């Protein structure tokens, strides 16, 4: 869709170019969401792709994903030795409700910043305990835990002059075993519930903590943490106690709660077998 009120597009080549951001001038990454609806209040865009950030970098302590990395690029993440969580990247990319054309322009940062409950990059980042680097409008940097970034349906901690710079996934999470489940009301519909489980390894190689992340079914991502794989009744009790199930065209709250219970138990059982 054309944004006919725009009068300028600013290529961001240095951080000071972000000074133009404000209520009527917003960041542009892939644009798949930005150009989906008329936004008559906008007068300008700041093009983050002009920074030329590398999509993926591989420091010794994990993985750094640029906010401008596309889902198509992330889906081709090369397998690294010991990264048992590698399948989760492709699984979350395929959870995106959109065509292959969208896949090739939609960005990791844009998906996070849009903060739709069904955003699959939210699932990925939260499930792997990622840290998000936010460039604040006052020139400061802030590291935000992924689980604290999204605050509600299409709301997050970003202000109008802030930019999400990158996502850092720690090596310990990349080495964990993961399990993934998604369900929608139709085969190609928007996700009604997306759950991801993670079984960490302790320093001595023994089974470590179990983390279940619930998204798409809830207004904000919810994490349940245990020192080890919990009993079925313990996990079911905690899932049932979640208080932010919601209803929209893609699923009723009671159905989403039921799917959370079902898929959560499937994940628990799968990772219990891995740990046994």
Image: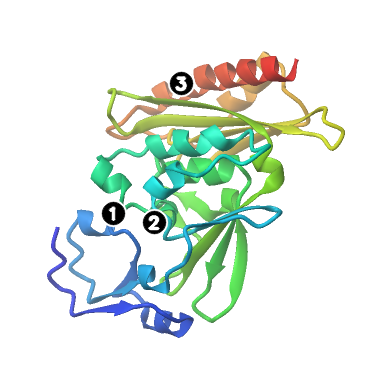
Q: For label 3, count other residues whose C-alpha is less than 10 Å away and answer few (under 14), some (14-19) or many (20+).
A: many
Q: Which residue is drawn at 82% across and 30% down?
A: 205
| Residue named by callout 3 | 259
Of residues 191 and 69, which is closer to you in this image?
A: 69
Of residues 175 and 275, which is closer to you in this image?
A: 175
| Residue named by callout 2 | 110
Of residues 161 and 132, which is closer to you in this image?
A: 132
Upstream in the sequence, badge 1 or badge 3?
Answer: 1
Q: What element carries label 1?
A: loop
Circles 1, 2 touching at the beta carbon (< 8 Å): yes
Count of labels in the image: 3
| Residue named by callout 1 | 33
User: Closer to us: mark 3 or mark 2?
Assistant: 2
Indicate left or right for 228 with 36 as reference: right
Q: Is mark 3 on a helix, strand or loop?
A: helix
Is residue 97 depicted above or below 65 in this figure? above
């Amino acid at each position: 869709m054309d944004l006919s009120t725009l009068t300028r597009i600013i290529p961001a080549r240095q951080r000071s170019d972000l000074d133009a951001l404000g209520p009527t001038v917003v960041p542009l990454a892939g644009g798949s969401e930005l150009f989906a609806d008329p936004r008559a209040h906008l007068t300008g865009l700041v093009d983050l792709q002009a920074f030329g950030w590398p999509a993926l970098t591989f420091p010794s302590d994990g993985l750094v994903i640029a906010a401008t990395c596309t889902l198509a690029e992330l889906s081709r993440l090369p397998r690294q030795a010991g990264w048992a969580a590698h399948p989760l990247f492709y699984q979350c990319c395929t959870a995106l409700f959109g065509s292959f054309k969208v896949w090739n322009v939609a960005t990791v940062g844009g998906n996070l910043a849009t903060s739709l409950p069904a955003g699959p990059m939210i699932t990925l980042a939260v499930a792997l305990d990622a840290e998000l680097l936010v460039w604040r409008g006052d020139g400061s940097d802030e590291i935000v835990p992924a689980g604290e970034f999204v605050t509600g349906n299409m709301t997050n901690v970003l202000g109008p002059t802030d930019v999400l710079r990158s996502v850092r996934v720690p090596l310990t999470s990349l080495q964990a075993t993961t399990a993934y489940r998604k369900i929608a009301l139709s085969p190609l519909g928007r996700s009604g519930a997306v759950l991801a489980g993670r079984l960490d390894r302790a320093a001595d190689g023994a089974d470590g903590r179990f983390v279940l992340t619930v998204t798409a079914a809830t207004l904000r991502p919810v994490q349940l943490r245990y020192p080890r794989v919990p009993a079925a009744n313990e996990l079911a009790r905690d899932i049932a106690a979640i208080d932010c199930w919601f209803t929209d065209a893609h699923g009723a709250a009671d159905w989403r709660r039921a799917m959370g219970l079902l898929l959560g138990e499937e994940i628990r059982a799968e990772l219990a077998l891995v740990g046994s």
